Image (spheres, coloured by chain):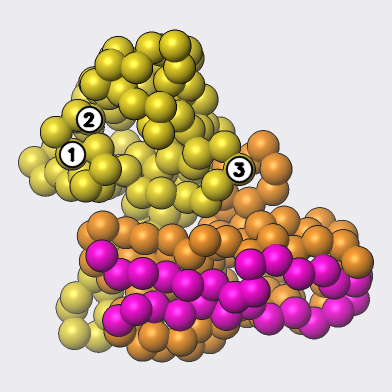
Amino acid sequence: EVQLVESGGGLVQPGGSLRLSCAASGFTFSSYEMNWVRQAPGKGLEWVSYISSSGSTIYYADSVKGRFTISRDNAKNSLYLQMNSLRAEDTAVYYCARAVRYYDSSGYYGRYFDYWGQGTLVTVSS
Amino acid sequence: AIRMTQSPSSFSASTGDRVTITCRASQGISSYLAWYQQKPGKAPKLLIYAASTLQSGVPSRFSGSGSGTDFTLTISCLQSEDFATYYCQQYYSYPITFGQGTRLEIK
């Protein structure tokens, strides 16, 4: 059974740092691309960051670029999100999500999210 | 970034009803469209990918259609467990973007 379990959330002051972890099990973690998605209280879903299976390709949302760093340790089946210079607007539940490639007939592909963790709450407040 | 617009934002329906939610992309995304269901306090759950392909284990009363910029999610016969919030997502290009969500409530 595929499982993704986030941890590391909590209360942090503005300008502070936090490191989130996502422990994966039930599948070959090193073969899958991964993402972080967040959801502010009462709001919709916002994609945050992507990392390729090897870790060689990384993307960020403009809202977190330069402040957040995504990484992974395939030996430990774990995904991370280092969050620095946190702001009140970063307050959200953070989910890790496994990505699956979808190819069309031209060979172009995109990635949808087939499994999500239960989320970890990050609250940025003084 | 590609903007995704869902309609309606919320509505009420009764068990047994047929409901349709629409999602429009600000530019063409071919069939790179997924639908997710989210219940309060839970993670999103994948329902449909590639605009119309049902994820394994999802009941057949859910269906999706569309291509390009206009998409729909249809629930053919609402069950009590279907009352939730639904999101569309484009995965044609990064940044991946979601619709604002459609909250489906019991009438």
Q: On the rendered structure, is B20 left or right of A67?
A: right
- Relative to B95, is B61 above or below? below
Q: Label 2 is placed on what type of residue?
A: Phe
Find residue A113 and report its horizontal and vertical position in percent.
Answer: 42, 54
Q: Locate residue B16: give its quadrant.
A: bottom right
Q: Residues within 10 Å of mark 1 (few under 14, many from 20)?
A: few
**Residue pushed farthest left?**
A56
Q: Nearer the viewer, residue A126 or B18?
A: A126
Query: Which numbered disc flags the more N-terminal residue, 3 or 2?
Result: 3
Q: Is residue B6 magenta?
A: yes
What chain does mark 1 sit on?
Answer: A
Find residue A96 and report its horizontal and vertical position in percent.
Answer: 41, 37
- Relative to A124, is B19 above or below? below
Q: Which chain is orange?
A: B
Q: Are marks 2 and 1 in contact (CB under 8 Å)?
A: yes
Drawn colour of chain A? yellow
Q: Are marks 3 and 2 in contact (CB under 8 Å)?
A: no
In the picture of the structure, the residue carrying the numbered disc 2 is: A68
Residue name at image x 44 percent, y 11 percent = A126
What chain does mark 2 sit on?
Answer: A
Find residue A73 and report its horizontal and vertical position in percent.
Answer: 22, 25
Cα distance between the residues tagged 3 and 1: 24 Å
In the picture of the structure, the residue carrying the numbered disc 1 is: A65
In the picture of the structure, the residue carrying the numbered disc 3 is: A42
What chain does mark 3 sit on?
Answer: A
Residue name at image x 30 percent, y 81 percent = B27
Residue interval drawn in magenta: B1-27
